[in-house]
Amino acid sequence: MEEVSRLVAIANGFDRNGQFDAAVSYYMEAFTALVGLVDSRIVASSFLDVANSYRLRADYLRDQQARIVSPQVKSEHQVNKERVKFLMNQALENDEAGNHDEAVELYSQAVECCLKASRSADCDEANRRNLHALAKNALERAEALKGIKAPPPTRRKSLESMNLPVVPTDEISQLRVDDVPTVPASAPRSPARSPKPSPVPARRTNPPSKAGGLDPYELKVLTHTSTINGRVYVPFIQVDLKERFAYPVVFTDKDGLLALANKQKQRLKGWMRPDEFMQNPKIIDKIDSGTIKQTIVSDCSFIASLAISARYERLFGKRLVTSIIYPQNKNGEPVYNPCGKYMIKFHINGINRKVIIDDRLPIGRNGEFLCSYSQNKTELWVSLLEKAYMKVMGGYDFPGSNSNIDLHAMTGWIPERIAIRPNTPEFDGNAVFEKLLQRFHQGHCLITLATGKMEQAEQDRTGLVDAHAYAVLDLRKFQDKRMLLVKNPWTHLRWKGRYSEKDVASWTPSLRKALDYNPEDAQQFDDGVFWIDFESVCRFFDVFYVNWDPALFPFTYGLHNSWTAGVGPVKDLYSVADNPQYTLEVNNVGGKCAVWILLTRHITDKNDFADNKEYITVLVYKGGKKVYLPFDPKPLIDGARINSPHYLCKMVVTDPGWQRYTLVVAQYEKMNTIHYTLRVYATSEMRLNKTKVPYTTKRTETGEWSGKTAGGCGNGLSRQTYMNNPIFHISLDDGSDDNALMMELRGPKQYSVGFEFKQVSSPRQKPFERKDSGAFRPGCTVLTLEGVPAGIYAIQPMTYLQAQEGPFIIRAESSCGFTIKRVQ
């Protein structure tokens, strides 16, 4: 009890002095300690009421800290003046840019807003005169722009005079290959922390058939997956930089208010706009990960992602966060909009998309934010970005995702999942730490951590939260110690193990100096930031989520496609003939070429996030030709099927010159149609196309092994019976002696099947040696041939063992016309 009394005394001192963060930390420690004494039966259960009083005081102080409603808000006249100023600025920018029609509309709206502001009750005579003068100037400029003469008419009839109907346009049809994620514009970089630039400007290697645009089917895919959780999010294209943000009346999102989580509903006072509770609202005053605070929305992975993106922007000057918020000024910096409209650019479902929101935010009964916010009380960037992302994800009642998904949406950076599995061949902890340490400080990646399932007792003992995301703010190596600086997005509740702020013994003077850290100072209040050693990370955390800067790869190209549920078998364990396949060609001219392949499944419903049952992967084969059997040839990369929207595989090409590979999209138990984007990143020139086959004619025949015709393969007891198996004749048209042929045999999966192929006749006496389908395989086997002369050929399908009865299917495809018939 002495320790509890000490903690409460310290908490009371901080409470009286207004140091509420520190007070909350010590009240919660006292609560935890006293509950522990009750659980251990050292003190009576009646002390639980005392413990709860500490917790309630901590909750109250947290609410007061989060309280944002200011008694000094702007008057109606001040709000109207801000709106006039914003309208005029937008009008002038469009005027200077030559967008005369838009400028006229904005000047006209500014006139209307000036007159409205001049009529407000708190507008004095001086302000009224200024507003009237401003309205007069705006009106005169609008009239002048209306009077600008159009170019003289030509002899040819204009479209208007011909009364042709105007065809409506849409954002999808205007998309081109260039409308893919690009590196955000960079502010001046700090010379001390500058990411290594790409060796050459980023380029895209386009197949000739797609020079400059997306094909109709890709447009169809992107159109279909633009509807997410019942709302349409069209691709972000160049014209969206001219989006209108200024209005004479405050903007209200046509999609309405977002759905709230249950905890928000219980505490909601109402939805408020910034000018109703802030004196001088702004988007960003000074971007800083330390000001970001998560509240009661279950989006810890998004807030952790936002924290490391903000820290990266602050360290390296690359605008990961500020570049995606609109409206912006001429310097590309987001600005507060008194008209209440904002546009956020997210990379979702294969392409950059625009998300329109208004500035209404959920506020609690005590005047506190019920969404995440910046602890710099005049900033809006955290709340607006979260609102936009929650809108796409279906509302604040979003079930949660992971930082790979969230960071990819926010930045377009390449997501990689590194499962932490100590003492397994798949996880080399030393290599992982060294790679992350080096690349983190070069500015090449963003890193978060996540815990897995944890028992409550372990959570209490370690201070870690079950299934929770954490931002990695720094990595250091000092002597034999490998350390990570980690932030809990809740901004409280820290690691309690080795190298925590209370483990003073581990913090030697040299380590304190090397990491610029004083544990005694850190004990004063809990901000959720802590140092932890890499060994403890490997013991208590489940996964690293790493997102890589795509600017590391000078060459990138992507394709958008669908895989229909009814195409091919549900499981592709026996055949991948119907799987989507792509040919990747890489020109290795520098000794080694890094190639990363990212498969992204488009998700359009938040229930899919909550219960993702689609397991996807990419199989990589050497050669570039179509693959029919999953293990023949043996894949270079046999990707594990995972139920994540993103699957990344990486390879290094060492053979010189142009190398060809086949990429096969695979799925476990395919039950639904999936829409996806396949994107390849490379350090050398490359080309990506759908895999082509030379076959123009297809035929299918069915048959059955029954009784005498179930003759087996000719080994052992079937040596005398295999010749009784069914025989089919394929007659290739007499047009060429250089034909390509593919034959596939499918039978019951419990039987190992195969077939022989031999020449019967050739019109020009061109010999072709006997072939077979190779090793007998369960249920399915394939043989592909080239240089086959015209003529008649016999196919004899068989099972490995005799007397195995059942149906079979022969599918043949050829580069020439042919017929097929059963002759035995």
Image (cartoon, helix red, strand yellow):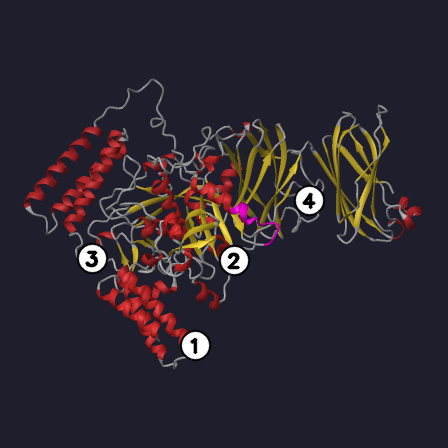
* Mark nearer the N terminus (4 vs 3): 3
For disc 1, the marked residue is 39
Mark 4 is on which residue type?
A: Pro
On residue 539, the disc is 2
Q: Where is residue 460? Give x, y as percent.
A: 44, 67
Give the labeled residue for mark 3. Answer: 70
Evaluate if marks 3 and 2 touch, with contact meaning CB atoms under 8 Å apart.
no
Could you give the CA–CA distance between mark 3 and mark 1, rounded to whole angstroms? 43 Å
**Viewer-side residue, 395 vs 687:** 687
Q: Earlier in the sequence, mark 4 or mark 1?
A: 1
**Residue corresponding to mark 4:** 630
In the current view of this chain or complex, which residue is farthest to the left? 125
Q: Residues within 10 Å of mark 1 (few under 14, many from 20)?
A: few
Specify which label sits upstream in the sequence, 3 or 1. 1
Asked whether residue 413 is in view, the answer is no
* Residue that lies at the very extreme toward the front in this rendered image: 509
Q: Position of residue 789 (x, y in %)?
A: 80, 27
Dominant secondary-structure state across the stretch colored magenta: loop
Tell me the distance, in whole angstroms, between the alpha carbons under discs 2 and 4: 36 Å
Report crowding for label 3: few under 14, some 14 to 19, many 20 or more residues within 10 A (C-alpha): some
The residue nearer to you, when weighing 271 against 813, is: 271
